[in-house]
Amino acid sequence: MAAIDRLEAAKYRISVVASTVGFDVLKENFKFNILSYIALIDIVTYMSINCYDIHLFWGDFIRVCFCLVTWSFGYQGSARIIVFVSKEKLIKDLLAKIKAFMLKMEKDMSTNFIVRRFAGYIDFQCKGITIIFYLTGLLTIVYPGLVYLFTKEAILPFGFIIPGLSDKELLGYTLNYCHHILQVIFTVAGLVAAQCINIIFLLGACLMIEVLIVNLKSLEKELKENDDDNHVEMHFIEIIKTHQEIIEFVHTLESLFNLMFLVDVFAISFQVVIILMVLSESIWIPGCVIMTMVSSMLFIDCAYGLYLELKFDAICTAIYDLSWHLMSLKNRKTVLFMLTRAQKPPLLTFGKMAYMNMATFVQVYKSIYSYFMMLKSFEA
């Protein structure tokens, strides 16, 4: 399969998933539809119900914590809707740039294999994220059935219930269960679509960097072999343009995602602290599933942030290794400027507070542990 076909396949899957919640922003003429309004109404009622149930169940430690944990998904979903709807044109432009870059570089024998490799990464990782998230959602829905099978205890997937519908009666339980299934469908679809778009853009940026590094190594070879000066000059100009495009592309990604990453970091930290508090008192299987899923989300975002950071380091090394002394005085100055710029690349952040990388992931979980221990000391 051609690289561009694999990109289109990934895009199609994202569109199918996003359309189930009415926010297929990759669609050419995206407009709000009935599903969009249902999703908006649902997210408002969902957060309102959770807020009401926190008051209703006050005194029941586990149910209150369950409501608090699931409440955070409302903030994460709201942040994604705000970002993707308000930046719809920007998202399409970025995707078009990746597609155009792939089409151009796939025709070049020296970069064809890189384009095909990264297209494979995008396709495989988007499939993997989709399968894992939907299996997690399915496990959440099926879990109450497994509990009933072994213990004869009727429980709901989540801790919240619709006001006025008791989960102790058959009708109320059934309606609440259906409501919970709807929340799983909407939540998983929204998270999958957003995560897959992140993957396409971040791996697209890394593809551009990889191609730039290949071109820099090719230029180094040409300089040492004393190739035609005009050819070297044109090659160097193309490298400068690619480097500028990469800087601009990643700057745009940072402006696009920093709000979403900010909400995710704080929401996930809150969720994990609450879940740990419950687990310190008793075994809570649904909480463990949620903690695994949200921790994986944060890990993936930080891992991609680190991968991008390492790619920028590779650019720096490739520029430093250039035989700049074999170039004209004007081009030597340009190389120096490129090196300076490469040493301070644009990187992904959460709310411009800190970089999204593995150091941040570790620091977040250290902070969570410290905060958790502080709360436990207060209880003691």
Image: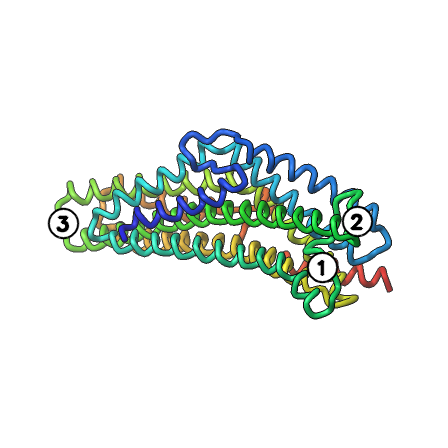
Q: Label for residue 227? A: 3
Q: Residue at x 38, y 43 (%)?
A: 246
Query: Residue at label 2?
Result: 166
Q: Give the quarter of the image for residue 120.
A: bottom left
The percent coordinates of residue 339 (x first, y second) are 37, 47
User: Please, what is the three-letter code of the amino acid marked with disc 3?
Assistant: Asp
Q: Label for residue 316? A: none
The residue nearer to you, when weighing 71 against 102, is 71
User: Please, what is the three-letter code of the amino acid marked with disc 1?
Assistant: Ile
Q: Residue furthest left?
A: 228
Q: CA distance from mark 2 to mark 3?
A: 80 Å
Which label lies toward us, 2 or 3?
A: 2
Marks 1 and 2 close (CB-CB < 8 Å):
no
Q: Residue at x 62, y 50 (%)?
A: 181
The residue nearer to you, when weighing 187 against 340, is 187
Q: Residue at x 54, y 37 (%)?
A: 83
Q: Look at the image and tell me whether residue 362 can be seen.
A: no
Instruction: Please state if 242 lies on the left or on the right of 297 as rendered.
Output: left
Q: CA distance from mark 3 to mark 1?
A: 64 Å
Q: Label for residue 275? A: 1
The quadrant of the image that shows the C terminus is bottom right
The percent coordinates of residue 225 (x first, y second) are 15, 55
